[in-house]
Amino acid sequence: MGLAYNVYLNAKRIYGCKTCKTHLADHDEIISRNFRGQHGKAYLFNAVVNTISGEAGERNMTTGRHIVRDVACRQCKEVVGWKYDRAYEPSEKYKEGKFILEQELLCQVS
């Protein structure tokens, strides 16, 4: 296993980890702002960087049952959201492979 380098995003608006300011996502990767997490408002992102994923587990959410895994900042290990691995409801399939980042756990880096 080699040394992991952080990815630095080059965009107008970048979201980072509130704890350590590590770049996590480009504002242009937001699919929807109409989500809620454990800490309030959350965003659905198409892609994130500099994260590590936890073990997959089944969770009952307001939109039904999903298989998700926690997503943490690679630098400080703070959990910042989760990734949808599988949605059981056909209307929720668009979430598969996408990421939720909670607004309360983010900061704007630029």
Image (cartoon, rainbow, N blue to C red):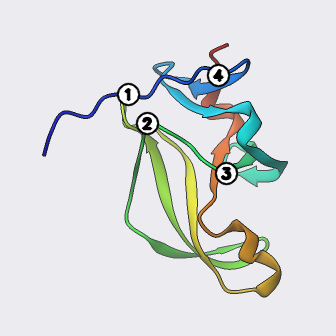
Q: What residue type is labelled 1?
A: Asn
Residue positioned 51% across, 19% down in the render: 21
Q: Residue 59 carries which label?
A: none
Image coords of residue 97 (percent x, y): 59, 64
Circles 3 and 4 in contact, beta carbons < 8 Å: no
Q: In this view, does 43 lie to the left or right of 99?
A: right
Does residue 35 lie above or below 80 as drawn? Answer: below
Local packing at callout 4 (Cα closer than 10 Å; few below 14, some 14-19, many 20+) is some
Residue positioned 36% across, 29% down in the render: 75
Does residue 73 lie above or below 109 as drawn? Answer: below
Image coords of residue 106 (percent x, y): 63, 29
Residue 63 found in image quarter: bottom right
- Residue tagged by mark 4? 107
Does residue 103 lie above or below 40 as drawn? Answer: above
Mark 4 or mark 1, which is nearer the start of the sequence?
1
Query: Foreground residue, 54 or 96?
Result: 96
Does residue 97 lie above or below 92 as drawn? Answer: above
Q: Which amino acid does label 4 sit on?
A: Cys
Q: What residue type is labelled 2?
A: Asn
**How far is mark 2 from mark 1, CA to CA?**
6 Å
**How far is mark 3 from mark 4, CA to CA?**
18 Å
- Residue tagged by mark 1? 6
- Residue tagged by mark 2? 50
Q: In this view, does 82 lie to the left or right of 87?
A: left
Q: In this view, does 48 lie to the left or right of 77?
A: right
**How far is mark 1 from mark 4, CA to CA?**
17 Å
**How far is mark 2 from mark 3, CA to CA?**
14 Å
Judge depth for marks 3 and 4 and give the one in front.
3
**How far is mark 1 from mark 3, CA to CA?**
19 Å
- Residue tagged by mark 3? 46
Mark 1 or mark 2, which is nearer the start of the sequence?
1
Image coords of residue 46 (percent x, y): 67, 51
